[in-house]
Amino acid sequence: MNRETVIVLDFGGQYNQLVARRVRECNVYCEIYSYKTGIEKIKEMNPRGIILTGGPNSCYEEDSPTYTKELFELGIPVLGLCYGAQLMQHILGGKVERAEVREYGKTEVFVDTTSELFSNVSPTTTCWMSHFDYISQTAPGFRVTAHTADCPVAAAENANLQLYAIQFHPEVLHTKEGTKMLYNFVRSVCGCAGDWKMDSFVEQSVRAIREKVGDGKVLCALSGGVDSSVAAVLLSKAVGDQLTCVFVDQGLLRKNEGDEVEAVFGPEGNYDLNFIRVNAQERFYQKLAGVSEPEAKRKIIGEEFIRVFEEEAKKIGAVDFLVQGTIYPDVVESGLGGESAVIKSHHNVGGLPDYVDFKEIIEPLRDLFKDEVRKAGLELGIPEYLVYRQPFPGPGLGIRIIGEVTAEKVRIVQDADAIYREEIAKAGLDQEINQYFAALTNMRSVGVMGDERTYDYAVALRAVKTIDFMTAEAAEIPFEVLNRVMNRIINEVKGVNRVMYDLTSKPPGTIEFE
Ligand code: XMP
């Protein structure tokens, strides 16, 4: 590795990505590897520091994940967290036992601030604990540097060997001064200079892309979402005219979205891009006519997208490279960040095809976390409102219209959604809610409007708070805001006579309706 890197060895903890993100927040590049990664590979990588994550096992049991003792003899600083801390102690001759009660939640920890790890940390600090096992005896040569009322060894170290063990989780936000501790580890103990910055990322990527592409032609499917926008602008900066961006308006975008994307990336926009907008609305509506099963709709939309893209690629001709907006969590979640030496291309991210006649896939963002993609976007001068967009699914409104999709239903859900988004923004809630939208239910009901009977659709409003989009809670939107949205939708959107707010969390619900 040329880059100054700290590696995280993953022992199955739920916070492994978080550890890497926090390290990167200290401007130190960090990658996650499986604990099965061999010692030789680690030596080859020559990292500046190694962090062992937590995990669900007990280190003294036979089949539990472990590592060779040599890891602690490389002369590379090691920080063990939770399971990682226990494993370090266990391997080096300390003792780990099952406690009578589990220590769980925010806990007051008393730290020895003479430890380099706890430099500038308050002597009594709140940390997040989650463990059954505990270190009852430290390994020879270690000294205890933190404890709690219940836990005699909340941290221990052998500073001479640069080995550090922390029982709690500095990576979670509940540990108030956790980032400071990680900063102390990577910047002071490991001595990293902190050269991982988005401006240098952009610069280095531009150079690498130029080298790879030479004078070849590059194609990018631009959806207007954060990842593809950042990838497109980065590529454009690197290879200018050799890049063509294809934006397919499939008639399932949010209100005015097609024009907004064109305004930014099209000929009148901020970038000098070869931009092709394909208005394929009718084509998609025709394919979707009469289809109401969600997975069938998804499939049709995905396939049709590929067909349109294919046609455009053919028109351009002789495309060498295809750009994909794969980001680091995609790589980690698909298990590619672990052991696999040869990392394969992640073809299906963003539903992109691998059929076009191209030599190679370029994934300029595959090392970045989402927040870093956003930072790179800002660095590249992409407007904030685009960079901080909420996620929008590939099949678009197609999965927010329950049942058959028609142009008329698209109009209804677009108008209702636009009102909803406008009012949420006006109420200043758009930054706290992670995803919110209107969906069109398949339900029609009787209403009364101006003495007339109506028989119209019900719109459902959804708003969720979530970190990872795997689990989510319905957001508590003030009633007055919901009321205003309801009034406006009923008055302004023809075809709607009822508005409902979805309280379901995920699980058991999903975020989208289909
Ligand atoms: P669910 O509905 O599965 O959504 O709770 C979780 C997140 O994924 C997005 N989503 C999709 N994104 N194609 C996509 O590109 C899809 O088919 C799709 N389905 C759901 C959803 O918007 C949410 O952010």
Image: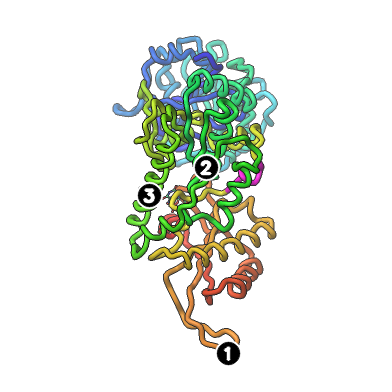
Looking at the image, the residue that sits furthest to the bottom is 451
Badge 3 amino acid: Glu
Three-letter amino acid code at the position of disc 2: Ile
Q: 77 above or below 266?
A: above
> What secondary structure is found at the residue carrying circle 1?
loop
Counting residues from the start of the chain, the first of labels 3 and 2 encountered is: 2
Q: CA distance from mark 2 to mark 1?
A: 49 Å
Which of the two residues, 133 or 174, is positioned nearer the viewer here?
Answer: 174
Q: Which residue is mark 1?
A: 451
Question: Is residue 387 at all visible to an observer of this figure?
Answer: no
Up/down of 390 relative to 282, above or below: above
Q: Residues within 10 Å of mark 1 (few under 14, many from 20)?
A: few
Residue visible at 51% across and 35% down? 244
Q: Nearer the viewer, mark 1 or mark 3?
A: 3
Q: Where does label 2 land, which residue?
A: 276
- Dot 1 or dot 3, earlier in sequence: 3
Within 8 Å of ligand 1, the CB of disc 3?
Answer: no
Q: State the residue in front, 315 or 444.
A: 315
Q: Are marks 2 and 1 in contact (CB under 8 Å)?
A: no
Front of the two marks 3 and 2:
2
Pinpoint residue 120: horizontal percent, then vertical percent: 70, 26
Q: Nearer the viewer, mark 2 or mark 1?
A: 2
What span is colored magenta in the figure? Answer: 383-389
Please tell me how crowded label 2 is: few (under 14), some (14-19), or many (20+) other residues with Cα within 10 Å.
Answer: some
Q: Position of residue 14 (x, y in %)?
A: 45, 38
Mark 3 vs mark 2, CA separation in Å: 17 Å
